[in-house]
Image: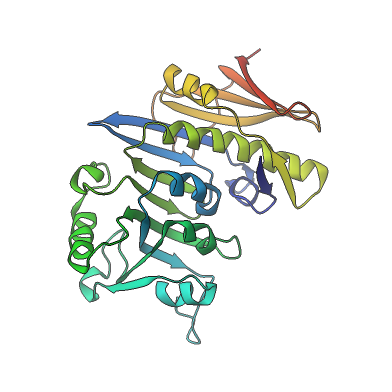
Amino acid sequence: MIEVGQQGAFSVNSVGMERRPFPLSFSVREAEGLWRVRASAAQAGELADLLVAVANDAVAVVALETNSYLDEDWRPLRPSLIAAELGVPCTVHSLGSWASGTNGLAEELLVMDRDLLPRLRDGTWSPYELTLIDVPADVRAEQLDELALVLGTTGIDEPLLSRQGDSRVWFSGHDDCYVMLETRDPALPAAVLARLLTLLAGSALAELIEEPVSRVPEPGPRLPEQLIATAPHWIGALGTVTEDLVAIGLAALPDPWQLGVSFPRQADLTATLDVRHGTWRITPAE
């Protein structure tokens, strides 16, 4: 069971001046034994356990930007000071000013035990940029310098992990809503899609029952795997929502979803959560 609160990504984000509900989006492609996923809407904290499950023993936070922690001059605190405020022990590796302005890199890297990632993203603050990659627990300073060089010179659509042999997962979150990740684990894309369905259903239930959180079962792996086998690009929107049932319309897209692309007039499939029995099913849309 997953606890989904009213402050999750699907609840706090909307589209346009009309504040239309934010759609579920998911896209996956595989190349050279690596899987690249683009998705929304999810906060880093809502996916942290999935990332921890496939990561090496440690993770390196390579970029962190937020307005939640500011100094007396209203400038964002350094990542190491944020970690200290949150009581998250970590090793700080300074890159220096050369990293300033490099997309996806901060001037310092934080290396921490992977199990501390949920504590770092504990739900009390929100980063508008967060990028991390897993590393061995005994990673050396020169390896972190090499990692920074790889991150700083890899294009946005180029495979990253193929140049970083020890790493299993790279994650980048924007506005605590948009997700990009790359992984060596073939099961992670389906797990992310299952989590997105759960988050969307849970946010709707929490609003309906007027409770801070709702507890929602996740679909088993077969359901998201079926969706991925059918099409690589999906958009989803809420349909019927009652205390007993949540329906999510799903439509395959020809390309990855972009902001401004509306849900088609007709869904292709419906994912339905039976709240009472705790089960999910996929059926053709009516």
Q: Which residue is found at the position 68% from the left and 40% from the top?
A: 202
Q: How many marks?
A: 0
In the image, residue 101 above or below residue 14: below
Depth order, front residue of 134/36: 134
Left or right: 48 with respect to 203?
Answer: left
Q: Quadrant of residue 270?
A: top right
Q: Which residue is found at the position 43% from the left and 36% from the top?
A: 188
Q: Which residue is found at the position 30% from the left and 63% from the top?
A: 105
In the image, residue 195 above or below residue 98: above
Task: Report x, y in % for residue 32.
Answer: 22, 31
Q: Which residue is found at the position 22% from the left and 58% from the top?
A: 147
Q: Can residue 256 be seen by looking at this rendering? A: no
Q: Can residue 79 be seen by looking at this rendering? A: yes
Depth order, front residue of 256/161: 161
Where's the N terminus, which quadrant?
Answer: top right
Where's the C terminus, which quadrant?
Answer: top right
Q: Quadrant of residue 7?
A: bottom right
Task: Report x, y in % for residue 111.
Answer: 35, 65
Q: Residue furthest bottom?
A: 72
Task: Report x, y in % for residue 212.
Answer: 75, 53
